[in-house]
Structures are given as structure tokens and as C-alpha cells.
Amino acid sequence: MGFEDNIGIKIGGRTINNLQYADDTTILAEEKEDMEKLLKKLKEESEKAGLSLNLKKIKIMTTGTLNEFILDGTEIEITSYHTLLGSIITRDGDNNKEINRRLSIGRMAMTKLEKIMKDRDVKKATKIKIAETIILPTVTYGSERWTVRKKERKKFMLLSYGRGEEFYEFPGQRREQTFQFWKT
């Protein structure tokens, strides 16, 4: 898309004003006026391609204060969080909402696999492999950008059915501690 080269945010000396994935587009700007220009350009370019931009689906998240944003007579929703590529991003950069969501998804996965994990006929090695290939990736998706505090670390520990064993491997932790629950 032919966006303005001088509008956007600077990252590593480059100006970036849009991120696109499938049918999602994220617009990046430092000023309200720049955001307005970029959205109008997006709308214009979409119409050239025979597409229409649904202004009711657009959401704006800002790190600053923005009380109102109107584009072509339509008020655009201002939100404090956004889901991008399956991860929740908040305006203040707090990971708690995303960590809680991931832990919840992990608990649901564990509940669905409970019969297998408690079956004495299933080998320990198989249980560990299930945890490593299904549950752990489900819980830790996007964790590279998380800041895990003591409070969140305790939640990871409680994920192992409240028995206090570590579920997630943190830096400095020995691998054999990680899946202790499934070794019993």
C-alpha cells in the first residue's frame, strides 16, 4: 500500500506506519493527525481495490490520552487493549491480562487431557511428551515478550493442579524440575 513514508513511528532508523497480516492491518502513528491521514489513505486505497473499510470495526489504542477520534463522521472506538496475532497487547504494556488468558487456556487443555495424564498405564515419558508438545506451547505462546513477576510465576506453579510443581521453565531452572507433575 502506498502509505506516506514520513508518517509513523521510528524503529531502528526506519519509519513504520503499518503492519499487515492476512486481512488485518495495524496502523502506527505518533500524532492524531497522522493517524487520521493514514486511515484516510487506507480507506482510499481499499476503495481503489474494490474493498470497503468498515469504520465500525476499527479500534484505536494509544499510549497517550485520546478522548475522541472521528473519521468521515464515524466515531472510532478507543480501547485499552488489542489482540494482535493471538496475543493481547495493552496500552500500558502490562502482560497480566495475556498471562492470565494463556494460563486459562492451559488449564482447559490440561482438563481435556486429565484422563490421559492420570492413567497409570500411560508411561511417564509419554505424559512428559504430551506436556512438552501440547500444553507448554499453548501456555507460553508469545511469552518471549512477557515480564514474569513473582505473582505470575506463582500462577504458573498453580497450573500443575495446585500441587506446587513448576509447569513453566524459567531461566536458571533445571529442566528436570519443569514437568515434575507428570513424573509422579
Image (cartoon, rainbow, N blue to C red):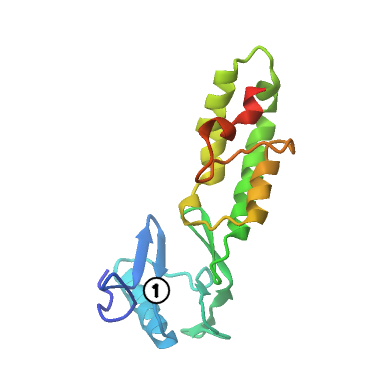
Q: Name the residue: 66% across, 24% down.
A: 117
Eyeballing the image, is 34 above or below 157? below
Residue highlighted by disc 1: 28
The image shows residue 183, relative to residue 75, as above or below, that is: above
The quadrant the N terminus occupies is bottom left
Residue 114: x and y in percent read 69, 27
Front position in the image: 55 or 109: 109
Q: Residue at x 60, y 15 (%)?
A: 123
Looking at the image, residue 53 sits to the left or right of residue 176; the answer is left
Residue that sits furthest to the top in the current view = 121
Foreground residue among 157 and 16: 157
Which quarter of the figure has residue 176? top right
In this rendering, is residue 9 above or below 153?
below
Instruction: Categorize mark 1 by other alpha carbons within 10 Å: few (<14), some (14-19), many (20+).
Output: many
- Where, quadrant-wise, is the C terminus in this rendering? top right
Indicate the position of residue 88 as horizontal and vertical percent values.
Answer: 54, 59
Task: Using residue 176 as the reference point, say whether residue 103 is left or right of it.
Answer: right
* Closer-to-camera residue (2/154): 154
**In what element is the residue under mark 1?**
loop
- Considering depth in this image, is 139 or 43 the residue closer to the camera? 139
Q: Residue furthest right?
A: 162
Residue 124, horizontal then vertical, whole percent: 60, 19
Percent of width and height locating residue 125: 55, 19
* Residue drawn at 66 percent across, 12 percent down: 121
**Residue 129 to residue 74: above or below:** above
Q: Amino acid at mark 1?
A: Leu
Q: Is residue 180 left or right of residue 2?
A: right
